[in-house]
């Protein structure tokens, strides 16, 4: 199968107009950022980099189990304008937060109250261990909605790494960028996230989904069929328990590996090393919760691989079916869904023109996604949003997402 051989179908005028409108939002953000940088620092930035937010089509809670994920980047990005300054001081300005802060590299000193700065500190501290990083000015702006499960943090940290490495001539291999980004989140921000989000922020390709083997870090692209669109259904909710529960799931998976390994009588590195036929006979013979967690991961890896193939064959019905199965498994076996996410999926499932829907990202709020017939995308977006409100949920938002490319130098 060739990933690149599909003819480009003509976009309708409506779609073209919308894509153009979105480009101008991104361009306005970029331009405004450069203006802000000049205003704050009295000169032009030496570099502007960007990285995208993402949605995960399928392969949820598999990355930290050495499994498969299949995300796409969206056309909403975080932009970092940066330039070197004399001395050792780092000054950073965030457009969205309207906050400015300064710091010096002091290993071990991280501000829990000033959360957003930890990403920049982490990047400068770790890069400084490779090659000396002196003072820098940063201005940061983003069109990735925060707290919506669209990985605004990976977009943010990857765009910073891209800027700092270039300004100080630090030759980081491409695959080291997401690895470093993950370390920053794990060690400097205190979130035990996996490799998926920074990986897609670095390597995404517009119009394509990317299948990542989170164990080997091998990856390959598959073109998204032209006749479908993706809707992002933001719940407007981020539960405080999300981080604790996320870390708890990671621990449960490790415990499941130990329990299954003992039962099977062979060492296992991760849940990637178990298949469904080995696992199901263990039902009732091991801790029930650990069994359910393992069952989700083992079946989700298969769904991610099958979805990749189905996309290559333009089999959108199968993709949709696998998305729904994934959601059910996340809801009942992995227990990371929420009433809002379930509501979106239940609403979408019943509408004509929807191939499938599921929660995306870590869960406990955040966003759901729907794969829909592109001819009906805007009417479906409106209908889903109205029905969500009709169920009494406030603060939701449904938007059409185009796929985007990975991190890049903008100027
Ligand atoms: C978060 C993490 C990812 C991944 C997903 C769940 O987005 O950052 O690494 O584990 O949750 O699939």
Image (cartoon, rainbow, N blue to C red):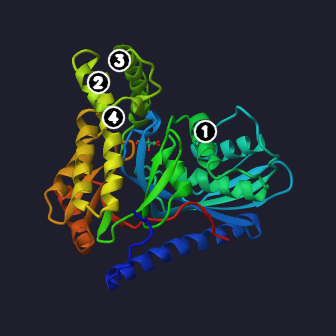
Query: Which mark sits nearer the N-terminus, 2 or 3?
Result: 3
Q: Nearer the viewer, mark 2 or mark 3?
A: 3
Circle count: 4
User: In the rendered view, would you say 91 is above or below 295?
Assistant: below
Q: Position of residue 95 (x, y in %)?
A: 58, 61
Res 338 quadrant in image? top left
Q: Secondary structure at mark 3?
A: helix
Q: Secondary structure at mark 4?
A: helix
Q: Quadrant of residue 300?
A: top left
Gap in angstroms between the C-alphas marked 4 and 1: 26 Å
What secondary structure is marked by label 2? helix
> On the picture, is 153 further left or further right than 408?
left
Q: Given this view, does label 3 or label 4 mark the residue nearer the observer? A: 3
Query: How far apart are the two marked residues, 1 and 3, measured between alpha carbons?
Result: 33 Å
- Regarding ligand 1, which quadrant of the image does it lie in? top left
Structural distance between the alpha carbons of marks 4 and 2:
10 Å
Among numbered discs 4 and 1, the one appearing first in the sequence: 1
* Quadrant in the picture for the C terminus: bottom right
As drawn, which residue projects farthest toward the bottom? 13
Q: Which mark is residue 291?
A: 2
Q: Mark 1 falls on what kind of element?
A: helix
Categorize mark 2 by other alpha carbons within 10 Å: few (<14), some (14-19), many (20+): many
Q: Which residue is mark 3?
A: 264
The mark found on residue 298 in the picture is: 4
How far apart are the alpha carbons under marks 2 and 3?
A: 14 Å
Q: Residue at x 37, y 43 (%)?
A: 60
């Amino acid at each position: 199968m060739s990933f690149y051989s599909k003819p480009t179908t003509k976009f309708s005028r409506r779609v073209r107009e919308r894509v153009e409108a979105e480009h101008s939002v991104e361009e306005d953000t970029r331009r405004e950022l450069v203006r802000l940088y000049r205003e704050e620092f009295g000169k032009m930035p030496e570099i502007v980099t960007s990285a995208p937010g993402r949605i995960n089509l399928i392969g949820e809670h598999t990355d930290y189990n050495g499994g498969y994920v299949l995300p796409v980047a969206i056309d909403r990005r975080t932009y970092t304008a940066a330039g070197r300054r004399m001395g050792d001081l780092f000054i950073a300005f965030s457009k969205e937060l309207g906050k400015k802060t300064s710091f010096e590299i002091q290993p071990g000193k991280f501000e829990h109250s000033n959360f957003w700065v930890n990403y920049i500190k982490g990047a400068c501290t770790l890069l400084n261990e490779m090659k000396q990083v002196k003072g820098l000015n940063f201005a940061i702006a983003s069109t990735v909605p925060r707290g919506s499960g669209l990985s605004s943090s990976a977009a943010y940290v990857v765009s910073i790494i891209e800027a700092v490495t270039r300004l100080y001539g630090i030759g980081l291999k491409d695959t080291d960028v997401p690895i470093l980004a993950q370390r920053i989140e794990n060690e400097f921000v205190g979130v035990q996230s996996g490799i998926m989000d920074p990986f897609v922020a670095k390597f995404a390709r517009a119009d394509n989904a990317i299948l990542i083997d989170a164990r080997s870090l091998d990856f390959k692209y598959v073109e998204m069929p032209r006749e479908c669109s993706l809707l992002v259904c933001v719940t407007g909710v981020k539960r405080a328990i999300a981080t604790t529960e996320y870390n708890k799931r990671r621990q449960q998976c490790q415990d499941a590996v130990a329990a299954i390994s003992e039962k099977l009588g062979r060492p296992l590195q991760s849940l990637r090393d178990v298949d469904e036929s080995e696992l199901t006979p263990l039902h009732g013979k091991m801790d029930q919760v650990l069994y359910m967690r393992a069952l989700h991961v083992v079946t989700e890896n298969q769904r991610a691989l099958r979805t990749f193939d189905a996309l290559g064959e333009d089999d959108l019905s199968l993709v949709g079916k696998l998305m729904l199965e994934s959601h059910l498994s996340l809801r009942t076996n992995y227990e990371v869904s929420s009433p809002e996410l379930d509501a979106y999926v239940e609403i979408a499932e019943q509408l004509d023109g929807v191939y499938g829907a599921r929660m995306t990202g870590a869960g406990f709020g955040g966003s759901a996604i729907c794969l829909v017939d592109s001819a009906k995308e805007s009417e479906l977006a409106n209908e889903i949003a109205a029905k969500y409100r009709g169920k009494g949920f406030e603060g939701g938002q449904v938007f059409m997402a185009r796929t985007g490319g990975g991190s890049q130098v903008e100027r």
